[in-house]
Amino acid sequence: MGDYKALFGAAKKESELADHLLYVTFLLVKENKFLLPILEHITNAAQKTLQALIEHEYTYKRISLCPTNFAVQISLYREQIEKTHALDPIFFRLLKKLIEIQRFEKDAIVRFKRGDKYILATGEYSQMTVLDVENIKKFLNCTKKFIEKAEPIVMKDD
């Protein structure tokens, strides 16, 4: 079993964990700050799925490089993997949005709860990102579809 299969297995576990946290634990806790760790697991699942796809393609010499930077991986996915395997462009948009939120979350100085939303903002409030349960559910569902579409690709060349 190649490294890409182990990565893909880890992606599925991250997705299952995010699902459990969102649909079971979050309902008990009902704390909007909890959305960030759930989003982190969703991002990890999408990122590991992307890495598995890239390593698979690299192993079978369909691509010539195997980058470790998430932004570079997204570009490589868009330029070569998405077209080769006829994957939905919505997955590219998901990956871009997840990396954007991940970067913003690291830079956000102000974090606060407003109703049922969790808001991240810069110090001057010039940039803000709003997270709510519905957005997180959309990210999770799209990530699950990405994993579902990637599975036959990653697992077929035995």
Image (cartoon, rainbow, N blue to C red):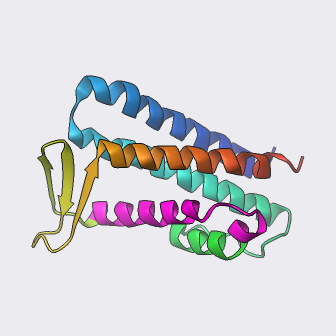
Say which quarter of the image contains residue 124. Answer: bottom left
Question: What's the residue at 35%, 61% (across, down)?
Answer: 101
* Residues drawn in magenta: 81-106
Q: Closer to the camera, 28 or 70?
A: 28
Q: Closer to the camera, 145 or 8?
A: 145
Question: What's the residue at 30%, 26% (across, down)?
Answer: 27
Question: What's the residue at 90%, 46% (across, down)?
Answer: 158
Question: What's the residue at 23%, 42% (across, down)?
Answer: 33
Name the spot of residue 42 as percent of width and height, x first. 46, 47
Tell me: 151 left or right of 20: right
Name the spot of residue 2 as percent of width and height, x first. 79, 49
Say which quarter of the image contains residue 84. Answer: bottom right
Name the spot of residue 143 as percent of width and height, x first. 54, 48
Please count the marks in the image.
0
Q: Main secondary structure of the magenta part?
A: helix
Which residue of the protein is positioned furthest toward the right in this rendering? 158
- Let me know if residue 99 is in the magenta part: yes
- Let me know if residue 18 is in the magenta part: no
